[in-house]
Image (spheres, rainbow, N blue to C red):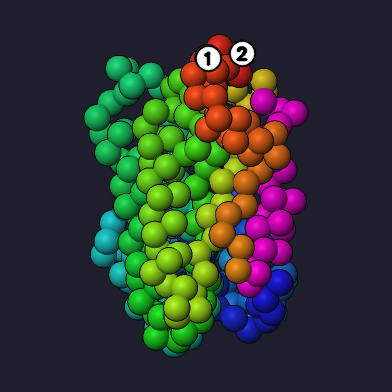
């Protein structure tokens, strides 16, 4: 792993869930952490924890990544306080387990603005700075849903599939400037994500054996920074299933729509 001590790391979606654990994990490595999310009070609490772990700076900035002006302000603050950005981890996002025919248009738009356009814009601003530095790493949290779509996840799957494609192109564009792009594709994680995506809690309960521990998974992600890795897919069973899906897509459709449809 790259030495993160004294480095500047931006984490979006840092007020809860995987984003929170990622912020704490990089802080434990001695990084200066810039935390961005919408919930100010919770974000400040996480920043306080980061400061204790790192003995470095931890800056909490209220930000809705779907708003360009809010993202611009985050980067202006980073420029003023640190003058450089070494790593960005895009973990902001949400889901909604609703059939397409029942989903509100506003929900679809919001999901794409946060999960897709927000991630793209943060990545773009980070890339501009890292190209000038000839160093850096962009870590985008996509999803196994972007590889294997299932019922009631059409819009969410599309928002994450777009990030996977975006990263694949961005990685090639930035390679010559020594900037790596790591795409993280998790399956279900035991976080508050499902309080919005699945308020009844049935899905995460049924997927309990496959669901990832957010603390351990965050540590795994941070351990891969600086290795030049292109993708991190977990759990292994879903990663293997994705390979099978490519070989036998019709069988894959049947399995994801019936046997493995836990929504």
User: To which quarter of the image does residue 221 belong?
Assistant: bottom right
Residue at the spot 42% in from the left edge and 35% down from the top edge = 156
Instruction: Say if 12 sits above or below 9 in the image.
Output: above
218 within the magenta span = yes
Q: Earlier in the sequence, mark 1 or mark 2?
A: 1
Q: Quadrant of the C terminus?
A: top right
* Image x and y of residue 193, in percent: 54, 38
Q: CA distance from mark 1 to mark 2?
A: 8 Å
Residue at the spot 50% in from the left edge and 37% down from the top edge = 147
Residue at the spot 63% in from the left edge and 27% down from the top edge = 204
Instruction: Say if 246 sits above or below 62 in the image.
Output: above
Q: Which residues are magenta?
A: 207-227
Residue neighbourhood size for the residue with mark 1, other residues' Cα within 10 Å, grouped as few (<14), some (14–19), many (≥20) = few
* Image x and y of residue 83, in percent: 44, 87
Task: Evaluate whether residue 194 shows in this view.
Answer: no
Which residue is the site of mark 1? 254
Residue 211 in the figure: left or right of residue 57: right
Which residue is the site of mark 2? 259
Residue neighbourhood size for the residue with mark 2, other residues' Cα within 10 Å, grouped as few (<14), some (14–19), many (≥20) = few
Q: Closest to the observer: 86 or 52?
A: 86
């Amino acid at each position: 792993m790259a030495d993160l001590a004294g480095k500047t790391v931006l984490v979006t979606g840092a007020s809860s869930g995987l984003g929170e654990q990622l912020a704490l994990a990089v802080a434990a490595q001695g990084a200066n952490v810039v935390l961005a999310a919408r919930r100010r009070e919770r974000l400040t609490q996480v920043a306080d924890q980061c400061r204790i772990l790192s003995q470095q700076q931890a800056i909490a900035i209220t930000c809705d990544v779907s708003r360009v002006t809010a993202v611009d302000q985050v980067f202006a603050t980073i420029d003023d306080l640190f003058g450089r950005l070494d790593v960005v981890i895009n973990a902001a996002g949400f889901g909604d387990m609703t059939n397409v025919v029942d989903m509100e248009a506003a929900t679809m738009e919001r999901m794409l603005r946060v999960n897709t356009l927000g991630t793209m814009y943060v990545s773009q601003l980070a890339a501009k700075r890292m190209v000038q530095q000839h160093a850096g790493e962009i870590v985008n949290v996509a999803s196994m849903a972007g590889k294997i779509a299932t019922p009631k996840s059409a819009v969410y799957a599309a928002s994450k599939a777009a990030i996977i494609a975006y990263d694949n192109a961005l990685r090639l564009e930035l390679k010559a400037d020594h900037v790596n792009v790591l795409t993280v594709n998790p399956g279900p994680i035991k976080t508050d994500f499902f309080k919005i995506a699945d308020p009844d809690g049935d899905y995460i309960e049924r997927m309990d054996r496959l669901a990832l521990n957010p603390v351990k998974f965050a540590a795994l992600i941070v351990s891969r920074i600086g290795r030049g890795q292109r993708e991190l897919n977990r759990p292994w069973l879903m990663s293997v299933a994705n390979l099978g899906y490519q070989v036998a897509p019709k069988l894959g459709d049947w399995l994801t729509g019936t046997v493995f449809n836990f929504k």
